[in-house]
Amino acid sequence: MKLKAQLARLQAELIAPKSNQARLLFEIRMVEEKLKIERLHRVSKLDSVNMREILCGSPGLGKKS
C-alpha cells in the first residue's frame, strides 16, 4: 500500500505549478508498473513460491538448490 500512497503523492505534485513534469510522469509510470507487478504476484501467488525453486535457464531443466 506504500506504492499507492507514493502514486497519490506524485500525482498531487504533478498538479502543482513549477513541477518538473517529465520527471514526475516518469516516476508515476514506474510506480504504476510496480503496482501492476505487485497485483499480478498477489493474484498468481508468485510471491509465495520458494525462491530456491526458481531455476536458471530453460524451465523444467534445472535442479532445486
Image: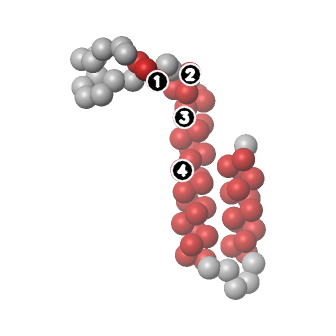
Do the CB atoms of the residues marked 3 and 1 lie less than 8 Å apart?
Answer: no
What distance separates the C-alpha of mark 1 from that of mark 2?
Answer: 8 Å
Residue highlighted by disc 1: 51
Disc 1 crowd, CA 10 A, few/some/many (<14, 14-19, 20+): few
Residue type at mark 3 is Leu
Q: Residue at x 74, y 59 (%)?
A: 8
Residue shown at the point (55%, 59%) measured from the top left? 29
Which mark sits nearer the N-terminus, 4 or 2?
A: 4
Q: Mark 3: few, some, or many residues within 10 Å (few <14, many ≥20)?
A: few
Residue at 37 percent across and 16 percent down: it is 65
Q: Nearer the viewer, mark 1 or mark 2?
A: 1
Disc 1, SS: helix
Q: Which residue is mark 3?
A: 40
Q: Residue at x 25, y 28 (%)?
A: 57
The amino acid type found where label 2 is placed reads Ser
Percent position of residue 51, x then y:
46, 23
Q: Quadrant of residue 47?
A: top right
Q: Nearer the viewer, mark 4 or mark 2?
A: 2
Type of amino acid under label 1: Met
Determine whether 57 is above or below 36 in the image. Answer: above
According to the image, label 4 marks what residue?
Answer: 33
Q: Tag on residue 14? A: none
Horizontal side of 64 relative to 19 (left or right) equals left
Disc on the earlier residue, 4 or 1: 4
Visible in this render: residue 44? no
**What's under tag 4, amino acid-wise?**
Glu
In the displayed structure, would residue 42 be above or below residue 19?
Answer: above
**Which residue was labeled with disc 2?**
48
Q: Residue 35: x, y in percent?
A: 60, 45
Query: Residue 15: percent from the left, percent from the top?
Result: 73, 75
